[in-house]
Amino acid sequence: MKDKKKVVLFWSGGKDSAMALKRIKENPNLEIVSLVSTFDALSSEIKYHGVPEVLITQQAQLLGLPLIRVYLPQDCTNEQYQEALDKYLRLFKAKGVELVAFGDIHLEDIRKYREELLAPYELEAYFPLWKEDPKALFSELLTSGHRVIISSVNEDVLPIRFLAKELSHELIDQFENIDILGENGEYHSFVTFGPGFKMRVLFSKNVTISQGPYTVCKLREA
């Protein structure tokens, strides 16, 4: 029997990460060995998402998966991002990892950047959701049992009334002229439950703040 390919998944805690994980688990030729999350070094949060490290850690524990934490400086440049990831990418290669997975769906420039980032390490960028139909993917997200809240919105394209709401078909029917999955940065999300979770993530909603182009509902551990 052919050995499974080892995969690490970049994990933001949101819906795209969760669906990418679902795809990886469904593939009999793949083995998920770790999640990787990047945090702002000062706030210990996923930047622009309003999600603290403690809740990402809780997700990983409920999924029964190891979590690698990468800390980034504020206003992180591409060069600093690459420097922060360097030792981890070298470690992945040394541990026999072949694929580094991301939840991107259709942004070609992001895909190209990730592929070029990994190429020097002889690691392959893997996009399990690539070019999937947004409506079908959203329906699968809900029917598979995922519970997801909107943790930040770009008010230039999505009104603040959607902030902290749970994703549903009824909710996205109110979206106007945006990608329903927020692939262009219209909003960010946080998964509170889903397949493989031992229980629901225990969290509460904290203050609402402005952060860059986003209005963010800062989440905290319940």
Image (cartoon, rainbow, N blue to C red):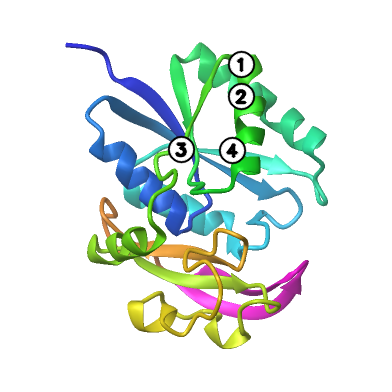
- The label nearer to you, 1 versus 3, is 3
Residue that label 4 marks: 111
> What segment is highlighted magenta in the picture?
203-222
Disc 3 marks a residue whose amino acid type is Phe
Kindly state the secondary structure of the residue where label 2 is placed: helix
Kindly state the secondary structure of the residue where label 4 is placed: helix
Alpha-carbon distance for marks 2 and 1? Answer: 6 Å
Alpha-carbon distance for marks 4 and 1? Answer: 16 Å
Residue that label 2 marks: 118
Percent from the top left, x then y, of residue 72?
73, 43
Closer to the chain start, of discs 4 and 1, is 4
Foreground residue among 205 and 175: 175
Q: Give the number of the disc on residue 127.
A: 3
Q: Was residue 82 drawn as part of the magenta stretch in this picture?
A: no
Q: How dense is the environment of label 2, judged by Cα within 10 Å: few (below 14), some, or many (20 and up)?
A: some
In percent of the image, x 35 and y 20: which residue is there? Answer: 5
Q: Give the number of the disc on residue 121.
A: 1
Compared with 4, 73 (above or below) is below
Disc 4 marks a residue whose amino acid type is Arg
Percent from the top left, x then y, of residue 103?
48, 46
Percent from the top left, x then y, of residue 34?
43, 34
Magenta stretch prevailing secondary structure: strand
Disc 1 marks a residue whose amino acid type is Tyr
